[in-house]
Amino acid sequence: MDAATAALIPGVLHAKGIVMLDLMGGAPEHPLFHLDALEDACEDHGQAMVYRGTISGHPHIFRVDEQHRLETEQMFPECGDTDRMLAETSFAPHLNIIGDFGRHFRPILGCG
């Protein structure tokens, strides 16, 4: 995802691979993550994740932003960038990650 695209997504700030997530819709309050391999567009690699309900204060829903709302124990298909933003950061212990980057199916239209 490029910076111009990321700037349009509520809750995600992005600059040269540095990502900040705004989980509750106000000022970003979580630490920055430096991710080297973000894609220029949302891409479908067949990945999904399941939120375990283990983030303090969020036992039923983990809302990353307006488009990414993970309900506890529900499978949530996601693009490669969302996978990296959550699976390669301190959020990983709270998720069951399904799939990898071994296959590419298509761009995800309307994502981000």
Image (spheres, helix red, strand yellow):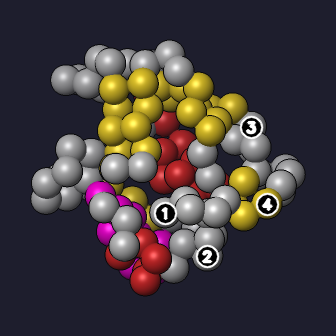
- Real-space Cα separation, disc 1 to disc 4, in angstroms: 15 Å
The amino acid beneath tag 4 is Arg
How much space separates mark 2 and mark 1, taking CA atoms? 11 Å
* Outermost residue to the front: 110
Where on the picture, by quarter, is residue 19?
bottom left
Residue 62, quarter of picture? top left
**Tag 3 near tag 1, CB within 8 Å:** no
Residue found at x 36% / y 73%: 8
Residue 86 in the image: state x and y as whole percent: 48, 45
Q: Which residue is mark 2?
A: 40
Image height check: is 70 above or below 10?
Answer: above
Q: Earlier in the sequence, mark 2 or mark 4?
A: 2
Residue behind mark 1: 112
Query: What percent of the width, then of the height, locates residue 46?
Result: 76, 43
Q: Earlier in the sequence, mark 2 or mark 1?
A: 2
Q: Which residue is mark 3?
A: 99
Q: Quadrant of residue 7?
A: bottom left
Q: Is residue 7 rendered to the left or right of residue 95? A: left
